[in-house]
Amino acid sequence: MKILFAASEAYPLVKTGGLGDVIHALPRALHQQGMDVRVILPAYRLILEQISNLRIAGWLQVQGAGRLHQIRILETIDHHLGVPLLLVDAPDLFDRPGSPYLHPDGYNWHDNAERFSVFSRAVAQLASTANMLDWKPDVVHAHDWQTGLLPAFLKLVPDAPAIIYTIHNLSYSGIFSHEEFIRLQLPGEWWSADALEFFGNFSMLKGGIIFSDKITTVSPSYAQEIQTPGFGYGFDGVLRTNHHKLRGILNGIDQEIWNPATDPYLPDHYSLKHRYLAGKRANKQALLEQLGVKLQDDQLNTPLLGFIGRLVEQKGVDLLLQIIPNILDNHDARLVVLGSGEKHFENALRELAALYPQRLLLTLGYSEELAHRIEAGADLFLMPSRFEPCGLNQMYSLRYGTPPLVHQVGGLADTVVDATPENLKNNTATGFIFHEPSAGSMLHAVERALSVYEKPASWHKLMRTAMAQDFGWTQSASEYIQLYEEISC
Ligand code: ADP
């Protein structure tokens, strides 16, 4: 079966979050199960700078905001992605500095609606015929708001492939004005509550919900949650109406990249079968030294907590900020934090780090290397997200023997088993869960975790159960294949 993945990012070429990881790993996993998969991305400057072996597959003329764009479709076999890569090359729109969505000064590109509608229109044209590539997909798999118009555009062409749409995070829904709708020359009948219109504006993501054959999201719990007002961001109604199309399929993780036995970023290697205690200890020591803390061997037993993530409200940073003084005042513990995001969170963390030198070890910024080292070197990983479609870091933590402490939402609820006395006894516990998005509830779970940490036998059992979990892509890829088969026959 031929599958075309259309998305706005793919690791390692361009990544701003979990979406990039998925567009790297899922196509490979599908390929391994016999699917003929290609990925199509916008030809950002960042990507063109990294790839040399490009071929022009052809040209398209695509409607933009009041103007036509002459677009090149570029083709490559990019060994980084492991499957063939196609690029929509519209230099006016994508040959720019900065991230895929943001100007280097940090604000959204003013023409994001045009950029991603042109991308979606181009992919729809390309996917509806075998003329250019001598290859026509049976299924187009679109992702997130940036490709939300793609299912809609595909409905306009005869003989279109089947289309599946994955929501990675409902809180980013591509909302633009009526004026933009007119400028993009979208069909007038789409300005309706049954199509793109969304409370006086229009939403590209809503196009994905309405016009696709199947909708998936990235964990079973999140698939349920987004049908409720508390998590639905205004889309809960339309998702309830379309619930017959909606499925939650848990993301996997790339177990080659995130493997403590081979991870090139780690100073020491370990696995469940080999030196997991010694290996973790060596990584902890190296991590602390890297962050300027030198401890005697006997001091290394004091717990090291970790946090990695975007510093935004979604990730529960406010909860973390509230409990840091409690943890550090009442326990001989340290906390290492890596992240970047909203300035007020960055400033608040900076102030706390100044109050707790050598205890709160803060790195503001983005570092793959440090992220890997924290996963390996920390004892307990904190993930207090207010909502979490799937979440990757808790699965990396499990694999690295660093029990995660999570809020019971979305993918966190689906991947972590709470260390209740009963679960600890029957060897099913893998981490710690708190139920209310409040500082008190989180702090209570941290206290619980630290008391288990004081009992090495229990803690080691928890680590071993965590490390034995399998969150590879094989199972999820099979579930996607089943869906592709359902819609393409
Ligand atoms: P989201 O996609 O909502 O940001 P996920 O947990 O699904 O959250 O994925 C986040 C990914 O980005 C993980 O691979 C995580 O390690 C990585 N990440 C987030 N912030 C940073 C950072 N500051 N430095 C390095 N990696 C980061």
Image: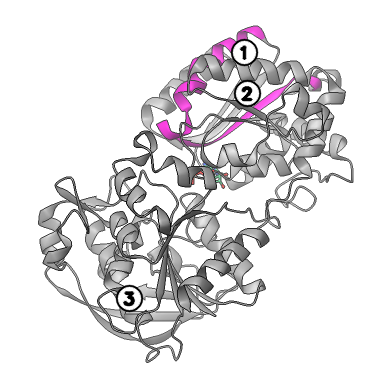
Percent from the top left, x then y, of residue 207? 28, 60
Q: CA distance from mark 3 to mark 2?
A: 48 Å
User: Between residues 26 and 308, which one lies in front from this camera angle?
Assistant: 26
User: Between residues 45 and 28, which one lies in front from this camera angle?
Assistant: 28
Instruction: Say if mark 2 contacts mark 1, CB within 8 Å.
Output: yes
Q: Nearer the viewer, mark 3 or mark 2?
A: 3
Name which residue type carries label 2: Leu
Label 3 crowd bin: few (<14), some (14–19), many (20+), radius 10 Å: many
- Identify the disc placed on residue 141: none
Span highlighted in magenta in the image: 301-330
Percent from the top left, x then y, of residue 354? 52, 16
Percent from the top left, x then y, of residue 254? 65, 56
Label 1 CB less than 8 angstroms from ligand 1: no
Residue drawn where x is 85% and y is 23% of the image: 456
Label 2 CB less than 8 angstroms from ligand 1: no
Quadrant position of residue 373: top right
Name which of mark 3 and mark 1 comes first in the sequence. 3
Can residue 359 be spotted in the picture? no
Q: CA distance from mark 3 to mark 1?
A: 54 Å
- Identify the disc placed on residue 328: 1
Residue drawn where x is 85% and y is 18% of the image: 298
Label 2 crowd bin: few (<14), some (14–19), many (20+), radius 10 Å: many
Mark 2 residue element: strand
- Identify the disc placed on residue 335: 2
User: Between residues 357 and 150, which one lies in front from this camera angle?
Assistant: 150
In the image, is 305 to the left or to the right of 407? right
Residue 302 lies within the magenta run: yes
Name which residue type carries label 1: Leu
Quadrant position of residue 475: bottom right
Q: Which residue is mark 3?
A: 124
